[in-house]
Amino acid sequence: MARGDWRKLDESDVRVRPGKGTRPRSKRRPAHADAVPAMVTAVDRGRWRCAVGSDADRTVTAMRARELGRTPIVVGDRVGLVGDVSGKPDTLARIVRVEERTSVLRRTADDTDPYERVVVANAEQLLIVTSLADPPPRTGFIDRCLVACYTGGLEPVLCLTKADLADPDELLASYSDLAVPAVVTRYDKDPEGLLDRLTGRVSALVGHSGVGKSTLVNRLVPDADLAVGEVSAVGKGRHTSVSAVALPLPGGGWVVDTPGVRSFGLAHVTADDIVGSFPEFAEAAEECPSGCGHLGAPEDPDCALDDVVATGAARPGRLESLRRLLASRAGLDA
């Protein structure tokens, strides 16, 4: 171009490099209508083991899709998978969807820990495994597990082991007002009635170390050791006893074996959460003074829950049991 010819150019002759557009990025995520339904059976270091459909023999290793961000995914979650869902060795699928949970078993490390942990999702019932002797039963732990059930949407079941060493009647009587179903087992006999309660359902087991939980699991799932060994490949060698794992029952259903715990923190639970699980007291609790912990005298002398019992609308034993749970949540059960 000769000098001065640029003066003859107009805007139609100028090439403009396109810049960044002003149109906002779409937040619409892929629908993944073809995603295959599955249930998470084990989690370890960025990998999830999933059972596809209702076929417990077809398991897939998956990673979390980028569009899910840091969405928490735990054992029991119902998810949608895309990619290679054949389950063949060295294949990897993607979790693109996490369905809404029907129940959650939560706990914190202790009562001052602000970080709550979801241990299991979508379990229908929680078996609170407690030995009657060696070690002796800890009612405070049982009460805390009951609180977690009532506030998380699970049905609690007492599973009392080692009945060959101690009589279960006294412990069962202390929970009779709560109408908690119970199964009593012995080391020298198969757990009668327990398998019937578990078959066809998703059930979680929780208990202190040494109460016989592993023995129960091995009796319920004959090849449990083999299954746990296979699941350990999810994290390439990490021992699975440190995290929950779901194992298929021979007649259908799942048992979720959780690691032995020393404490069951309830920092995420309020007193009103617990009272809300007792319909006969929930409405009266709204009439309590602000800040009432519903523990009764001397801590809460003006608690309206006493009036419910006084009018005959609830049994005294129910209120005593409720307040025992409230005391456990408040750390007064020691």
Image: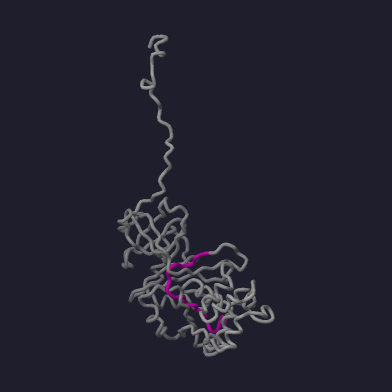
User: Tell me, what colour scheme is on the image?
Assistant: one colour
Name the residue: 32% across, 59% down. Answer: 36
Q: Is residue 125 magenta?
A: yes
> Which residue in the rendered view is the most extreme toward the right?
298
Coordinates of residue 31 in the picture (x, y in percent): 34, 54
- Nearest the viewer among 3 and 197 is 3
Coordinates of residue 43 in the picture (x, y in percent): 44, 61
The quarter of the image holding the N terminus is: top left
Secondary structure mostly seen in magenta is strand
The quarter of the image holding the C terminus is: bottom right
Q: Which residues are magenta?
A: 117-136
**Quarter of the image where one finds residue 4:** top left
Q: Is residue 126 magenta?
A: yes
> Which residue in the rendered view is the most extreme toward the top?
3
Coordinates of residue 143 in the picture (x, y in percent): 56, 78
- Nearest the viewer among 224 and 250 is 250
Coordinates of residue 54 in the picture (x, y in percent): 32, 68
Name the residue: 39% across, 9% down. Answer: 2
